[in-house]
Image (cartoon, helix red, strand yellow):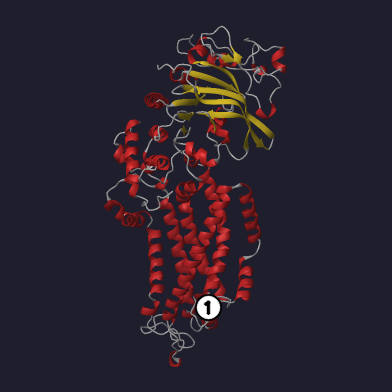
Amino acid sequence: MMTAPADQTAPLLEIEDLSVAFRTERGLVRAVDGANLTLRAGETLALVGESGSGKSVTALSILGLLGDNARVERGRILFEGEDLLRLDRRALRGIRGHRISMIFQEPMSSLNPVLTIGRQVAEPIRLHQGRSWPEALDQAAELLARVAIPDPRERLAQYPHHFSGGMRQRVMIAMALACQPRLIIADEPTTALDVTVQAQILELLKTLTRETGAALLLITHDLGVVARYAERVAVMYAGRIVESASARALYGTPRHPYTEGLMASVPSLTGEPRARLLTISGQPPDLADLPPGCAFAPRCPHVHELCRGTVPALQPATGTSDRDHRSACHGYP
Amino acid sequence: MTDAAIPAAGAAGLPRSVHDNRFLAFNRRLIREKPLGAVGGAVFLLFLLAGALADVIAPFGLNETDMLRRLEAPNLAHWFGTDHLGRDVFSRILMGAQLSMIVGLAAAGLATVVSIVLGVLSGYLGGRIDMLIQRFVDAWMTFPDLVLLIVVVSIVGPGVPQIVLILGLLYGIAGSRIVRGAVISVRENMYTHAAQSMGATTWHILRRHILPNIMPVVIVLFTTRIGAVILAEAGLSFLGLGVPPPAPTWGGMLSDSGRSYLYLAPWLALAPGLCLTAVVYAINVYGDALRDLLDPRMRGSR
């Protein structure tokens, strides 16, 4: 596994105190609440959490792709020193797909069914690099070859329905790589795929980001994926980052009860046969009606009085191998 | 962006001949998979040709009367018989086809353009614009078509341009609902989000992703509108509000000589009536067949 560039390099992406709220019929729902994230060039950061924990909203807000009913309440998203939240639509379009690109969860519907694969892969190249069609198509063929699609020349002329789910996700990766972005955001890129294909796709993403030096923000709910492909991990719960650390430190010495619970609920092949699978008791909280203190308190096995009243801050954790290990828990000072 | 000159298929890098034969290949598929639709298309094409060449192929003059041969039953000289003024019904049917086709294609074309503009604005932009447009469409649709037509025609007077404009707006505004629905379902597809995430402009997304994907809906809308507009024009002419006589409209022929001599000379009503039915039915089955074939998800493997 590649080691991250030295710590002194300036962060590629820095999310500071980001809060995003949605107007809904039930009132204002804060999907992301004061999230902080740092991603260095070439690094792979996994953003882990349950459905509704705010990980996808965080990702979408980086590219300004939130819907009309969403509003960024506060915070900054610094990309190469530039606050993306302050850019106008035009400037943002220049960054999308060019310096930051995104891979979505649904490879089956992420491609336009009436356009050939060639047109769709060549599109960002033409859009951002001003190439002619033949040049862009040549480049598209090279890209397809890089994502290990056989006969790329012939495949360019085909339509999405000629491709399987895994192959389509490869096409999406090719599109994402087209302009050699500095950052790739992959929002649960393998959730919709067969298990056997999942590993191939992640392996491919990992190899290609390493080759191109792009940073990868990998959004997932699968801790097994995190362990194998990410250098750093941030765990999200109810819109807040509750723990962030290197993957090694997070697995070795988790410093938040939610992380511990997540890891305990991963089925193990080596554990005792027929052992009951552990689960985290209770339900994820209702974002429209969060408890006043720590959002995890109602489900936490180690809860005490302080947790129910005050939201714990994300602060350096002790007893860990990683100096940047942070956790937001009153119980793990 | 400046890529308008790129032919739709040229980007695929296929040899040129493949594209040149696309039209032929499509028609072969139409005949093989949708024989009824193919027949419909052929019948419509026949009427279109008849209309286009009416001046050339009509055996008699439009208003050439022969009082000695009034109300003749169909025979070799007069294929569809003659009317109460001794005019050749076949010739008048041909000229009527020309009028029907002009009104049908022009008004349906206008209606489709209006539907696309309103539907795309409303469906893609959403929000306040959507609200405004939809309330306008709601209000518009509370007027009964016929009443609106009668009122407008009695103000501006009958004539082909007026009829095209009125029918085009009438059906266009109502049809915008259908386009709006299609746009909304396409807009929510992941690929429009993906295109946005790749830095595509709104215009680009509309042109590349929205429009091509609503084409099946638009094509069916256009074809069924041709039928509806032809019928509506016939209805107006029947009421005397369409193209004024002596222009030979099918609706006018039905009400004028057709109704008066229904028992004495039924061919006077049968000829325009059957033509109307045939054209409208033909264009509708053709439209349905096109819709089924044009949907790429239904395209068989190559």
**CA neighbours of label 1 inside 10 A, class few (<14), some (14 to 19), many (20+):** many
For mark 1, name the chain. B
Q: Is residue A319 visible?
A: yes
* Residue B33 x/y as whole percent: 36, 53
In this picture, residue A97 sits left or right of residue A27:
left
Residue at image coords 46%, 26%: A216
Residue at image coords 52%, 62%: B111
**Res. B115 image quadrant:** bottom right
* Residue B96 x/y as whole percent: 46, 76
| Count of residue discs | 1
* Residue B20 x/y as whole percent: 30, 55
Quarter of the rendering occupied by the C terminus of chain A? top right
The residue indicated by pointer 1 is B252
* Residue A60 x/y as whole percent: 54, 33
Q: Is residue A106 above or below residue A198?
A: below
Q: Is residue B171 above or below residue B250?
A: above
In this picture, residue A30 sits left or right of residue B196:
right
Disc 1 marks a residue whose amino acid type is Gly
Q: Residue furthest top?
A: A319
